[in-house]
Image (tube, coloured by chain):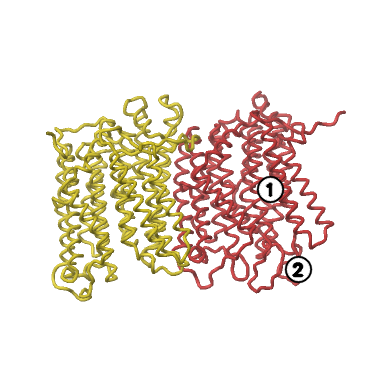
Chain colours: A yellow, B red
Amino acid sequence: MTNFPWLTLLWALPVLGAVVIILLPTPQRQAAKYAGLGVSLAVLAVAVILAVSFNPAGERYQFVENHTWITYFGTGYILGVDGIALTLVVLTAVLMPLLLLAGWNDADDRPGRSGRAPHGYVALMLATQGMVLMSLISLDILLFYVFFEAMLIPMYFLIGGFGARNPATSKAAVKFLLYNLFGGLLMLAALVGLYVATANDKAFADGTFDFRQISDAISNGSFVIAPALANALFLGFMFAFAVKAPLWPFHRWLPDAAVQATPASAVLMMAVMDKVGTFGMLRYCLPLFPDASTFFRPAIITLAVIGILYGALLAIGQTDVMRLIAYTSISHFGFIILGIFVMTSQGQSGASLYMVNHGIATAALFLIAGFLVSRRGTRVIADFGGVQKVAPVLAGTFLIAGLATLALPGLAPFVSEFLVLIGTYTRYPAVAVVAAVALVLSALYVLWMYQRMMTGPVTGGNEAVPDLRPRELLVIVPLIALLVVLGVYPKIALDVINPAVTHTLTSIHQSDPAPNLSAGGSR
Amino acid sequence: MTAPSIEYGMLSPILIVLGIAIAGVLIEAFAPRQSRYGAQVALSLAGLVAAFAALVLVYANLGTGVGQLAAVGAVTVDRPTLFLQGTILLVAILGLLLIAEHTTYDGSGSGASGLDAFTAQASTVPGSIAEKVATKAGIAQTEVFPLTMFAVGGMLLFPAAGDLLTMFIALEVFSLPLYLMCGLARRRRLLSQEASLKYFLLGAFSSAFFLYGMALLYGYAGTLSITGIAAAINAGSGSKTLVLLGLALVTVALLFKVGAVPFHAWVPDVYQGAPTPVTAFMAAATKIAAFGALLRLLYVAAPALKDDWRPVLWAVAILTMVAGTIAAVTQRDVKRMLAYSAVAHTGFILTGVVAANPAGLTGTLFYLAAYGFSTLGAFAVVGVVRDRDGTEQTDLARWAGLGRRYPLVGVVFSLFLLAFAGIPLTSGFVSKFAVFKAAGEGGAIPLVVVGVVASGIAAYFYVRVIVMMFFTDPPEDAPVVAPPSSLSVVAIAITAVITFALGALPQPLLDLADSAARLLT
């Protein structure tokens, strides 16, 4: 079982599927969509097999595959997953079929693309998924970087090519691409610096990008980077991840891109692709540059808290429902980054779980809002009112998703938000108090949005809003179910996350400031 | 007096190409007009393929040795030379496919035959009756084929030169046909002739610099041979000012040929005015040959003066990267934008040269090979976008929506643009990483930072073209993509596949470049 190249299969399936689908004949539009759905379900099956066979108490990285790639650069084709990567892989695999279902008809009204718009749409979604998966499972830093940058291209075409038909779309797509490219290019300079540092140090035979070797050498002290250089390299890596995640003030590309893209592509971007940014912080920034991380910790935590409050405050004042949800995303990402950089076990476990929960909750919220918007053709909140009377199921699921976003106990995001706040409080009590203010703000933006759109008398234009159709129910019900299950029984996720977090903290020589009662408790 | 020994075997690639060129001239003189085109194309292609086969044999015979001097020290046949010559030959084969494009796309359907990109009779005054008569008669100016072969022959000799005189002769042999070919465009002839004149005047000027520098170096070293000059520099006798001046003047000429700032002024005008197949061939092959010569000069003749020329090249590299990138941002013409991007890429390649370590040599060799193919492909794609009357449409605003109407063209051109931008999974990323890694190892980290920032700015104008092609509505009188014959399709397909393959699996070429990175000193 462990000798079968599961991880190669995991990323190769969607990429090869994308190539096959783009080559399908033009009249086979429906076949292209069903083929895409089939491929994504196959990827889900592989991810489930991985999740089931993963041994939380076993080695740190499992299903490792190691082959040569470009020996001249010291980079190899090295794949492997730890607990945190595994949860994100499962999140991506679960979300993909749902996103394809949600975006089933999004590409149908695109003239002038010689009728191949559905093929292109499905192929681009699958290609993005494949590249995201490759970034998550890569244990070689240059391999990670290649796909970290490469995933921008299909995403860019998804936003610009299938988004709303106005000039703002291509502007949003270009902004997305250039912001992220620039961040990535600074990381390239840092990568070159890291390679030169490994090449010059006697801890390694040659320059290398093998993450396990480098992080082991750093944590046992055999590889030491000069502090000034380590700080510069950390900033280079961090800049790229801060733009991707996004961290305030590098967030300006997100609201425009999320609003102009189709809802399914926007969810792919926010719930799946951006996680690679925070994953990169946790996986690469901390273990590679532990002292630099500690040095910049106060600054990053400050930015994270500003992002939390900024996103929440701006969300309250939005008149456009999609933009509102996009700003809530910025706020949530602030929480995730906060949890990562407080460097406590609860904080990092909470942040890792938050990545999963945010993905599910934002997907649900954004997709339902997308269904509603597609019925009326307007994104303005004031145009809606009293929808719950005409479309009770839609309103009900929207409420559950909204309550998840504001971290109601019993739904999944509560556990992660609570863990992050506890983890912050043990090290920086004042910061935790400030961040907790966001709980109030999130209640404000969610409940007020729900009240304006769904409750009250049915306003003009909303009388004939149809309720959720079967295809849409098929998308939403699994998401709601996951929110409930992970809210009541988060152990299934935390069991794989906690050992990985413990490993990370030990390797960066950080420990919790107070006695640790992480989720699950001690018996 | 015994005759000098000529190692014909080692020189066979160059001799084959020059022999084919002479045969081409004879065909022009004696063959009947109808059969000239077929004979020339067949002869030139066969010659280039034969030269490449001979080159592979020579490389195989080298075994693990570094190489040797040939022709009484006039020609150096060493590993980097053979690598670069092989690349030039492959680029020349693809360029020849573009030059030989026969279909004359003419919206009126008059079906006049002839070479697509080249004027029917260069001696006619543009706009005159004679020109119309010649075009209607379907004359094809097939002299371009032997001209191309002479240019290739010169380019093969340029990086292989063992002494400065041979280098100068090679410089002239490959430059003069190129000056001429730049003026032979079929449409917009005045622009083309202007480009040719500019190239000729500035090129003649730079050749004069080369000669003067050569004379000063002879005065210093007493010999023109490159290894002899190196020995004289190592011996240290004589005025250092003299050798630095001579070196500087020769370097100026070489920097002119590669298009480095501040000697790049000819690049946009010449790239824009020349017939697009010639631009494609020239952009790729001239750079490869000239960088080969620059490497030989700096790494073989003057390695001892490293501390003197490295700071100057630092400055030139930074200026080139920055000026090329910034100038390209405001361009409205695709060919000019690609020309300024070529200048920026020269800056990146110079970063590899400045590194002055074996990794720098490997990186430079790989970059030249990868960039040669992608730039040829990019210009080839530019050449198929025409107005209804057959004139090339290179105004960026009129390219709007091209990717929507012709998805394949859009995707292929985007691939080349992304390769220029250095997006991972394209050959451009691997090339940039190779030179930046070498620069980092050579202690030139500021160059890496400038390079990275320039790449970021460059991404803007590359992405702008992609946005125009895919996400903007087409204008009313949008250009069409003239269905090219299989010659151009093959060339574009090969370059696109190479660009992607070198991005995903570059190790074979990197290994080849690495094993080739030992100069004969």
Q: Pointer 2: residues within 10 angstroms few (<14), some, or many (20+)? A: some
| Label 1 and label 2 in one chain | yes
- Nearer to us of marks 1 and 2 is 2
Q: Is residue B509 left or right of residue A462?
A: right
| Image location of residue A103, percent across then percent down | 33, 62
The amino acid on which the numbered mark 1 sits, given as a three-letter code, is Phe
Chain identifier of the residue bearing label 2 in the image: B
- Is residue B278 in sight in this rendering? yes
Vertical position of residue A51 compared to residue A254: above or below:
above
The amino acid on which the numbered mark 2 sits, given as a three-letter code, is Ala
Q: Quadrant of residue A190?
A: top left
Residue placed furthest toward the left: A523
Q: Is residue B228 left or right of residue A37?
A: right
Residue B134 shows which numbered tag?
Answer: 2
Q: Pointer 1: residues within 10 angstroms few (<14), some, or many (20+)? A: some
Q: Is residue A398 left or right of residue A270?
A: left
Q: Residue at x 59, y 51 (%)?
A: B494
Quarter in which the N terminus of chain B is drawn:
top right
Of residues A302 and B35, the one drawn nearer to the viewer in this rendering? B35
Secondary structure beneath label 2:
helix
Vertical position of residue A62 compared to residue A169: above or below:
above
Q: Residue at x 18, y 71 (%)?
A: A390
Chain identifier of the residue bearing label 1 in the image: B
Q: Is residue B99 left or right of residue A250?
A: right
| Image location of residue B489, percent across then percent down | 60, 58
Of callouts 1 and 2, which one flags the residue occurring earlier in the amino acid sequence?
Answer: 2
Q: Residue tagged by mark 1?
A: B205
